[in-house]
Every structure is written in C-alpha cells, then in structure tokens.
Image (cartoon, grey):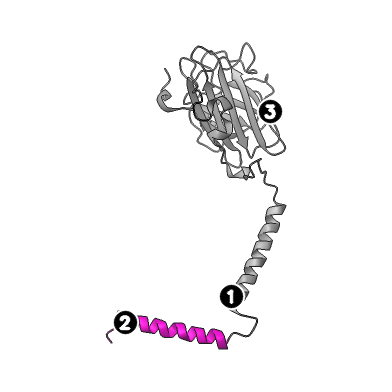
Amino acid sequence: MNTTPRHIALAIGVAVLALGGCRESDVSPGNNSDVVLDERNIEANQELGQALSDTDAPVDAQGLDDASGQVTEEDIMPSEFKGDGARQPDRIAFVTLQPTAGNTVSGLVAFIHEDAASETVRVVGKLIGIAEGEHGMHVHENGNCTGPAASTAGAHYDPDGSMVHGDRTAAARHLGDLGNIVAGADQIATFDFTDERIKVVGPNSIAQKALIVHASGDDLSTQPSGNSGDPIACGIITPQENNLVPE
C-alpha cells in the first residue's frame, strides 16, 4: 500500500473524530476526563500547600528558601562597595563554601583589602544550613577540599611557624586562626570583622588556601586546632580578576 502524507492526515482525522464521539457518548455525565484532571490538580495543589506550610526550612527576609544555597555577592558585600559609582576595594578574594559529606552548610565569604595603605583585611560572609551556635572558622594550609572531611586541606595555615593555636585577636596564633562565627536559630550565620595579619596578596597571602568551617565552637586554646570538631564546609580562597597569583 502506498502511504502518502494525505493518507496519514486522513487517518489522524478519522481517529480524532472517533475519540470525540467516544468522549461524548461513552463517558458518563459528571465524569468527563477534563473534570477529573482538574479535580486532581486541585487536590495536588492543596496537598502541596499543606506540605509547604508544614516545612521547617528557613526562609530569609526576601522569602527565599535558604536551603537552596544561593548566597550571592550582593548578599554579603558592604554597602559602600555596591551600586553605580561605588568605590572599589584595593584587593578582594572570594570563597564559595560547599558542604562536606553528610552536611548541609553552604555560603559565600569575601576577604576585602579595602585600601592599599591599610594593613587590615575585612572578612564578611553569609552561611546557610548551619546549626545554631558557635563554629570555628580557619584558613588551612592547602587549597584542597577533597575527601569526605576535607582532610586534604591540611593543618591551620601557619607560615610564621608559630605552632600556637589561638583567637584571631591573640598575639600568638596560627595565621589561619579566625576564631568563631555564630549561627542563629534560623540556621544562618552572617559576620563582618577585620583582621590585621592575614593578607590577600604578599608573603602572608591566604590566596588559594582552603577555608574551613567546623561543626563546633573553637575553644581558642586547645592545641593544635581548638577542638572545634569535624569540617562541615570547605572552599578555596580565590582572588578576583588580576589578583590570581600572590605577589
């Protein structure tokens, strides 16, 4: 049999007419397939609405689900560096934090060297999906976050060889000792502090090192790492644009 496009179109038309007749004659009143589908959609929407109202996922002020892990530069940058005509920092490096195996923490941290004449680096960030309470945060010596517990990141960054763990304000400390950050009941931690020892470039540069957030608070004294528990998030400190290689 020679099948042409005209024959195919005719066959389709016959099938459509047959289905139309079946729909009018064989489907009982009140049980039209379109009506059944609409009723199912209504039920599904009601169930979805109930599920959303019952969820414990934290929601930020913009109504965004913080479990999504979408923290942006806009969320963390200080106001003086945002918008048209805003001044630009001398140097800046960003860290995208990702959860280690079995954890949910993510976020973004910026290390900002605001002024070339200043010795201070400003550290700002936002983490989400993080348990309420204190968490140790440290720069580690290797720029590597592989392994289930980011074990390849190595020890705390200590280019001076001080071999003493402490708070970020202590006279003697590992260069990578950044103290604690604090998460609220909404499982969000935001922070903004300054440090006069770490550098984005130069001999004490933290560029291409790993930043790790830990499960517990740093007691700021126990050697060699503050007894702050397992790593729950890790990321590589990456200078922006022309600052990719430490000077």
**Residue 113 visible to an observer of this rendering:** yes
Which region shows up in magenta?
Answer: 1-26
Mark 2 or 3, closer to the camera: 2
Q: Residue furthest left?
A: 2
**Residue picked out by circle 1:** 34
Q: CA distance from mark 2 to mark 3?
A: 76 Å
Mark 2 residue type:
Arg
Image quarter where the N terminus lies is bottom left
1 and 3 marks in contact (CB < 8 Å): no
Image quarter where the C terminus lies is top left
Mark 3 residue type:
Gly
Image side of residue 210 versus residue 131, left or right: left
Question: Which element is circle 1 on?
Answer: helix
1 and 2 marks in contact (CB < 8 Å): no
Q: CA distance from mark 1 to mark 2?
A: 31 Å
Going 56% across and 25% down the picture, which residue do you hit? Answer: 80
**Residue picked out by circle 2:** 6
Question: Which element is circle 2 on?
Answer: helix
**Residue picked out by circle 3:** 217
Label 1 Cα crowd, 10 Å radius (few <14 / some 14-19 / many 20+): few
